[in-house]
Amino acid sequence: MNSVNSFAFLIAFIDLLWLFALMGIPALMTATLLGVYVPKEERRIPQVARIRRSFLLLGAGSALLGGILSILAYFLSKGSEGWTLALLLIPQALGFFVTWNFSRRQALALKAERGWKVPQSSKRTAYIGSDRESAATGVSAWAYLLHILVILITVALVALNWDRIPNPLPVHFDAAGLPDRYAEKSIGSVYTLTILQSLLTALFAGIHFSLRRMRQSLDPSDPQGSLRRQIQLRASNSWMLFLISLIAMIMFSWLQIRSTYDFRGTLPIGLAIAFLLLLTIPIVGFMIYIRRRGLEDEGINRRHGEDRFWRGGMFYFNPQDPGLFAEKRTGFGWTFNFARPTAWLLMTAVIMLPIAAVVATTLFVG
Amino acid sequence: MFIELDLQSEVPIYKQLADQLIEGIASGTLSSGQPLPSVRTLAADLGINLHTVNKAYQALKQEGFLEIHRKQGVIVQPGALPTADSAFRERLGRDLRPLIAEAVARGMKENELQTLMTALYGQVQNPSSQGGTST
């Protein structure tokens, strides 16, 4: 696979994932229409389907536009990766923004016309038994020591073969696996990937501990059943996160070792892509498990599902809610409560992580 | 044990919570020395203000049904529970009086009232969810 082909393949692959996340997932949700809550009995009416269809069509249009612009950019800039990506993702993002707003306005108009309301329950229930701590099953925190072990082994292996690492060493590879940038050999430049790996481990461990402490959100109409389902949901979720982080660990270690130890020739990018595909296994497994056990609606936000708390249909903003995290309105998972300043802090930190990684590599590597 | 609240009830939330905790202790569902969730945790789980939970916990602590420690947190009274002393009996009489008055005014017989009392007593001691039988 030469440089141009693998670049095109990589870009297409990433773009499809990006489009699926932006357009596909909102389109698949039945409980909300472009971030507007739809009552159960209204979900199958033709107007809802029509708005969803027009959203997908407009989205597809902007996706196509991005594709055309990026191909033009590739040829006009004589193969510049940066320009190609920019003219692919930016028009698509802008297109999504416009499409979302347009379709959402239609959805809100339909809501007003049909008088949609979020079902409110004035009941609350919580489990206070003495075994509530042990009821938080799933992966034990100690399991994350495995990640540290992987990192330590990698550090040791690289250290043992220090003398066989070329100087200058390759620190950046193009889409075909050929090195295109070199740096002076130093601890920082050799162990760049390990540093990133450690930061990533810290992030995943942090997520694990936060999820442990997440509040209950039981269904008052079925406390027992709801408790059982939530335990299953959280346990399976913690397993999925553990497996994803472990695969990522191993991938990083493999990259680290492969790109420093007695490096010759090219980096097999195909294997890197195989690792990425491997990551989808725990995710898909988790989704199948949820569907099998009927857990899809268990983790939803029961208390603050009204549209007024969800800015743009996406961002939860509720000053009355002291919690930092809130359950999502559809599917499973948590989102930030952006009325809490800490949420902005954490969000910034998470966004800054890749940026910090890039800065760190440039600083260490020159 | 599950706490179940009705936010629209006439009964204040802290009282619903305190009442249910006492019932838990009465039935043995909450055992002696059993740890309870912290104020923050229970408030978050129920989606109510933590001052409400705190009020319920403090009220029960004052009566002697709960102990609140700095490190261990909130636990059900590990030692002897408060007794039905004269102060309690006086309060109970005061609280029951208006209820009985209305029952009398509505023509309820004394033995009917006693049957109801016995039934409630039995239910509290042996809640059906535990598989206990009560007449």
Image (spheres, coloured by chain):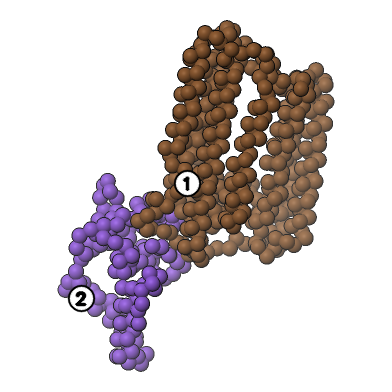
Q: Position of residue B5 (x, y in %)?
A: 43, 65
- Type of residue at label 1? Gly
Question: The residue tagged with tag 2: helix, strand or loop?
Answer: helix
Circle on res. A162: none
User: Which chain is disc 1 placed on?
Assistant: A
- Residue positioned 28% across, 55% down in the render: B75
**Residue indicated by mark 1:** A138
User: Which chain is disc 2 placed on?
Assistant: B
User: Can you say which quadrant of the picture contains the N terminus of chain A?
Assistant: top right
Q: Position of residue A72 (x, y in %)?
A: 83, 25
Tag in front: 2 or 1: 1
In the picture, which chain is purple?
B
Taking the image as shown, residue B108 lies to the left or right of residue B64, namely: right
Question: The residue tagged with tag 1: helix, strand or loop?
Answer: loop
Res B128 → quadrant: bottom left
Taking the image as shown, residue A93 lies to the left or right of residue B119, namely: right
In the picture, which chain is brown?
A
**Residue indicated by mark 2:** B90
Image height of A199 relative to B75, above or below: above
* Depth check, front residue: A286 or B40: A286
Image height of A75 relative to A111, above or below: above
Say whether mark 1 and mark 2 are on the same chain: no
Q: Position of residue A317 (x, y in %)?
A: 54, 47
- Residue positioned 28% across, 48% down in the render: B72
State whether residue A341 appears in this view: no
- Type of residue at label 2? Glu
Q: Residues within 10 Å of mark 2 (few under 14, many from 20)?
A: few
User: Can you say which quadrant of the picture contains the C terminus of chain A?
Assistant: top right
Res A118 → quadrant: bottom right
Whole-number angstrom distance, CA of label 2 to CA of label 1: 51 Å
Confirm or deny contact between disc 2 and disc 1 (CB under 8 A): no
Res B122 → quadrant: bottom left
